[in-house]
Amino acid sequence: MRAISLFGALALLSAAAVGCSVDQTKLPAGDTGSVEVALQAAPGVTINVVSYMISGPSGFSKTGTIDVSNSSTVSTTIGGLPAGSGFTVTLTGSSTDGATTCGGGPVSFIVVAGQTAPVSVHLTCHEAPRTGSVLVTGTLNICPAIDNVSANPAEVFVGGSVALTGMAHDSDAAPSALTYLWTASSGTFSTPTAVSTSFTCATPGIATITLSASDGDPACASTSSVAVICTAVTCDDGNPCTTDTRNADGTCAHAQVPDGSLCTGGNLHVKLLGFNDFHGHLDAGQKVAGRPVGGAGVLVSYLRAAEAGIEDQTIIVHAGDEVGASPPDSALLQDEPSISVLNLLANSSCSYMDKMNPGCNLVGTLGNHEFDEGRVELLRLLNGGNFATGPFLEDPYRGARFPYVSANVVDDITGQPLIQPLVVKQVHGVPVAFIGAVLKGTPTIVVPTGVAGLTFQDEADAINSYVPGLKAMGVHAIVVTIHQGGFQTSYTGPTDPTKTLSSGPEITDIVNRLDDEIDVVVSGHTHAFTNALLSNQHGKKILVTQAFSFSTAYDDIDLLIDPVSKDVVSKTASVVTTFGDAGPGLTPAADAQAITDAAFAKVAPLITQVFGFANTPFSRTENAAGESTLGDLIADAQAEATGAQLTFMNAGGIRADLAAGDITYNALFTIQPFGNTMVTMNLTGGLIYQVLEQQFPGAFGQTTQRIMKTSGFHYTWDSTKPAGSKIVEVDIGGVPIDLNATYRVSCNNFMATGGDGFTTFISGNNQVGGPIDLDVLIAYVKAHTPFTAGTLDRITRLP
């Protein structure tokens, strides 16, 4: 930045008064710095002050005064004028008694760098015209500029010092001509007039340090500032499991805190509360061992009770399928109420704008059902925005205020994960990472439109790929939340190292290949119990949990983490049933219950309609052959609606049992919530055998046993036969089907596109679409009520 000073001399002789006379001398030869003005004062009247006003281009203005009361000749310096044209100067003179006032100007002049500019101003006294003159000479001065001011370090304890360095230059002066001065809002300097010095913090807070550079022109000083953080001296070693004190000599002392809720044996206690496969089950009404369990209000009450007193050491984890395949009070509202219930569990560090905040106490992952309506609806549900037929309970709907993570779902166009792959939480300064994943077989159990444009990578490979980066960040406590699981005989109490899975090759293989840094896997998908220590390929024991489904239980996981190494040194879990008739379940969380009640009220006029009556319960529980009474009922309804000779229904599409009594819309929607449509096609007898073989693992790419529910025919299968050869006979009314004949077959659109691994249906020709499966079931109930469960005789198993 440049400023320009005008150095001039104003020479005035004495003062003038009323009736004054004036003599003006000529300038001596070669004198360009001053001019004498001779003024003869009237008796008893004196001019004490001459004032000047200088104006210039772009609104420039400068004013000042000159004291002439005790001088016969005076001079002054007028600085700060930039080079250029268009300047004017005006002078006025006044006496202490106000009897005399003289003025002159304005007179124009030009300021030229390095040159003088003579200016004459005639003064006129108000009583009688008299004149004098003033000569102003000007020289350009370029102010110094400060190039840099730095402090190293920028933060220091009180009493500590930082090195200060300044750099400045002046275009028309030698470096040695510059002078410096350091000032500060607090603290001291070793040499405040040196261009580089040291500064000592005096008080906690931010010290603002300013360097001034000058070339001697008082109108031309330059300044620049830097901030230094002065931190109070502390003995905190960053370990939450030690007490930190200062000795009398100023040294620090540390002692292990007593065992308690914060630490045990010097290790930090971290609690994980996991659950999975909520599927929008807001309402109470489920039972375990004849006792009421679950519902949003009960689950939230249990989780809050489990974290009470250690909220800042607790992280809540869900392992997918929070939504989808939901009862109507959640599903008809696009499952927004189920996300809203989860938001109730989030702490103040969780927010819609800062979901990845390390202090946020909640994390979830994607399940296959999050993809039921495709990626656009999935992302809307997570990130907010009203649905086309909304708003429902919240306007505008804001989405989840906590992070969802998934490492193995990749956008085909960008090549990047669809959502964040992981999140790192901080518990009392100790980092804990959560990596998400969903079963790689998701495309086989979701309609193709739901996963279009997405690739589902191998779970273990995707998870492991992020471990080196976490280790480089100093993160060694790593939890996986994955929507894939196994089966285990349930038990109560803490993890029993002698018990393991009864089945679940997929999750076993994933855990076997996980990196040694991974400590815990919170799993889901199979709606089963898991509380086991499974070994990876290096023998590392990894805790794996799963808490059934539908809010009927949760995982209570306790970790001990070494605050120094940041690694997990102990892990154990219990799977706790959320009974509604005991403990926290006796008082459901009021805020969660309010969401449940509001959702029900919104859809009540529709879902309370009664369509029929069931004399007996209809169960989806399969007999040894794989048949169920509810499956038979649904398959019969679809056969009647389509007129097909043979009808197939996938077991996974039947989501609940049908109780005896009134059959309501609510009950039927809960049983068939997906809104699949019927498809009728032609299949040869040979292809019918093939699709039936696909019910068993290892046959035509099938990964697990999935017995379909049927109508219009009977078949026999032999459990002792190898995969691909288990079907013994298929008959219609006792007559074996012809392998070369063509039959009219019906199934839902999910199966028709190869869902659940039944890829043979894709080969069906002359495909014709039909009504929605729920409408088919409602129409059948209306037409045939009342109902009584029949004999299970459509499938025969050998031996």
Image (cartoon, rainbow, N blue to C red):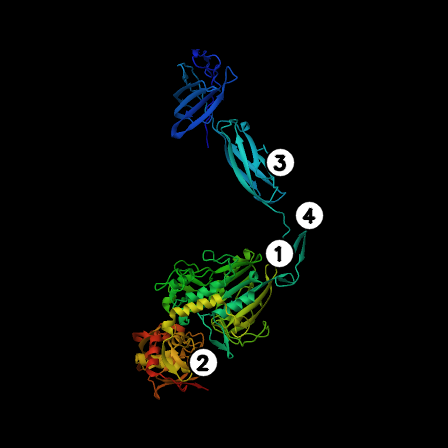
Q: Tell me: 287 left or right of 631.
A: right
User: Residue flagged by tag 4: what amino acid is it?
Assistant: Gly
User: Residue flagged by tag 2: what amino acid is it?
Assistant: Thr
Q: Distance between the residues labelled 1 and 2?
A: 53 Å
Label drawn at residue 621: 2
Give the image location of residue 91, x and y in percent: 43, 21
- The answer to the question of whether label 3 and label 1 lie on touching residues, with beta carbons closer than 8 A, is no
Disc 3 on helix, strand or loop? loop
Count residues near mark 2 (Cα–Cα under 10 Å), then give few for <14, some for 14-19, many for 20+.
some
Q: Earlier in the sequence, mark 1 or mark 4?
A: 1
Label drawn at residue 239: 1
Badge 3 is on which residue? 190
Give the image location of residue 376, x and y in percent: 38, 62
Q: Which of marks 3 and 4 is nearer the N terminus?
A: 3
Give the image location of residue 588, x and y in percent: 50, 70
Disc 4 on helix, strand or loop? loop
Q: How far apart are marks 3 and 1 (CA)?
A: 36 Å
User: Residue flagged by tag 3: what amino acid is it?
Assistant: Ser
Between 322 and 106, the residue placed more toward the observer is: 106
Q: Can residue 744 be seen in this view?
A: no
User: Residue flagged by tag 1: what amino acid is it?
Assistant: Asn
Count residues near mark 3 (Cα–Cα under 10 Å), then give few for <14, some for 14-19, many for 20+.
few
Between 63 and 100, the residue placed more toward the observer is: 100
